[in-house]
Amino acid sequence: YNWHIPKFLRKEPIQQGDIVLVRTANGVARVLVMQAFREEFEETQKRYKRVIKVIERAPKKEPVS
């Protein structure tokens, strides 16, 4: 499934592994982000339901030393 990320949530980009709250046909649900990509509305003419908020960020991977 695809959702729209509102501008106020783009300050810290949503990444793979984050858990977000989204609107669905049955209310709201928590969703694990599997992939994030950018799509231009002018090219696709598609509209998506919005991400409401980020619930949990994926842990940062630290380089192995």
Image: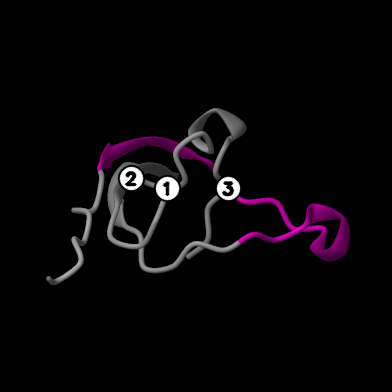
Which residue is farthest left? 65
| Nearest the eye: 29 or 4 | 4
Q: Position of residue 35 (x, y in %)?
A: 44, 68
Q: Position of residue 52 (x, y in %)?
A: 43, 34
Please tell me whether residue 35 is drawn above or below residue 60 in the rendered image.
Answer: below
Mark 1 / mark 3, whichever is N-terminal: 3
The residue labelled by disc 2 is: 20
Q: Report crowding for label 3: few under 14, some 14 to 19, many 20 or more residues within 10 A (C-alpha).
A: some
Q: Is residue 22 magenta?
A: no
The residue labelled by disc 1 is: 24
Please tell me whether residue 44 is drawn above or below residue 24 in the rendered image.
Answer: below
| Nearest the eye: 24 or 65 | 65
The residue labelled by disc 3 is: 4
Which three-letter amino acid code belongs to the residue tagged 3? His
Q: Report crowding for label 1: few under 14, some 14 to 19, many 20 or more residues within 10 A (C-alpha).
A: few
Left or right of 61 in this view: 49: right
Q: Is residue 41 magenta?
A: yes
Label 1 – label 3 distance at C-alpha: 12 Å
Q: Are marks 1 and 2 in contact (CB under 8 Å)?
A: no
Q: Residue at x 86, y 63 (%)?
A: 43
Q: Nearer the viewer, mark 1 or mark 2?
A: 2
Label 1 – label 2 distance at C-alpha: 12 Å
Q: Residue at x 70, y 51 (%)?
A: 47
Magenta segment, which residues?
38-56
Which three-letter amino acid code belongs to the residue tagged 2? Val
Left or right of 3 in this view: 63: left
